[in-house]
Image (tube, helix red, strand yellow):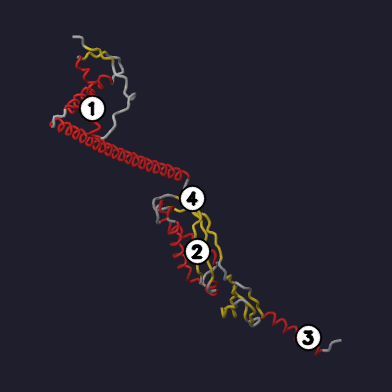
Amino acid sequence: MFGGLDVIIIFLAILVFALLLAGIKTVPQGYNYTVERFGRYTKTLTPGLNLIIPFIDRVGARMNMMEQVLDVPTQEVITKDNAIVAVDGVAFYQVLSAPQAAYQVSNLQNAILNLTMTNIRTVMGSMDLDELLSNRDAINERLLRVVDEAAHPWGIKVTRVEIKDINPPANLVESMARQMMAERNKRAQILEAEGLKQAQVLEAEGRKEAAFRDAEARERAAEAEARATQVVSEAIAKGDVQAINYFVAQKYTEALAKIGSSSNNKIVLMPMEASSLIGSLGGIGAIAKEVFGEQPPAAGRSSRPPRIAPDQS
């Protein structure tokens, strides 16, 4: 049986143990607890083992100090050019000061959500639809700056605000598709016209180069003809009969070549003196060897001459 003193000792031991349990607080990593004494904030408990005065101090708010994600639901926004688009997003924030987040604003997540949605409407409503669709990074940067500045008194650091989807109406999407197709067709026509222009320029340059080459060839042929005529003239001046025979034979040969170039069969009447052309061929070969240093053409290579009937008159 226990005496009265033993009961008191046991009671005091239990009371001390209960007081220790009530005064020892363990805070997990990533959290901060606020301590209130008679309803007034006194201090903040950091992660680890902490002591408070039992029955006088109590834990007020348990604040998550890790970075958190907040989904921004879809809402309709009217742009500057009166287009209605559906927009949703996501916000990332972190509590930097547990007392401010606990006591400066009520329902922290709801406050951040409404602040973000309001600024999304404000920022995107001041932009045209084309600007809205092409400048998403600029929108995110502007939203981050505005929301972070507004949430700073709450002890909150907004790290990112991202727009996830921008959905214009179906009829507006169809109009944009037609506009894009027209723009692509326009660029294709411009490229085709430029290609045609370049091709015409190159063709003109080719004709110019060909004309230049033809003129150069004619010039060289004329120079060769002038040189040959000069040589024949000098030979004639020196009294060389073979030069005269060469000149006459050349003209006869050219005339016969023109007559015989036709595919029709012809009978050509020529005077008997034309037979002297055969005798002149030796003179032609000698002069050609002397002037040009070339061998006379081999036999068997000449084309079939037209039939010549001597004039009996």
Q: Distance of mark 2 from mark 1, alpha carbons?
A: 101 Å
> What numbered label is drawn on residue 160?
2
Looking at the rendered structure, the kind of residue marked 1 is: Ile
Q: Residue at x 80, y 90 (%)?
A: 5
Q: Earlier in the sequence, mark 2 or mark 4?
A: 2
The quarter of the image holding the N terminus is: bottom right
The three-letter code of the residue at mark 4 reads: Asn
Q: Alpha-carbon distance for marks 4 and 1? A: 95 Å
- Number of the front mark, 2 or 3: 2
Q: Mark 2 or mark 3, which has the lower sequence index?
A: 3
- Label 4: which residue? 167
Query: 236 left or right of 72?
Result: left
Q: Could you classify mark 1 by the number of other residues whose Cα lies within 10 Å: few (under 14), some (14-19), or many (20 or more)? A: many
Q: Alpha carbon of mark 3 to alpha carbon of mark 4: how far?
A: 72 Å
The location of residue 166, given as percent across then percent down, is 48, 52
Q: Nearer the viewer, mark 2 or mark 1?
A: 1
Q: Which residue is mark 1?
A: 284
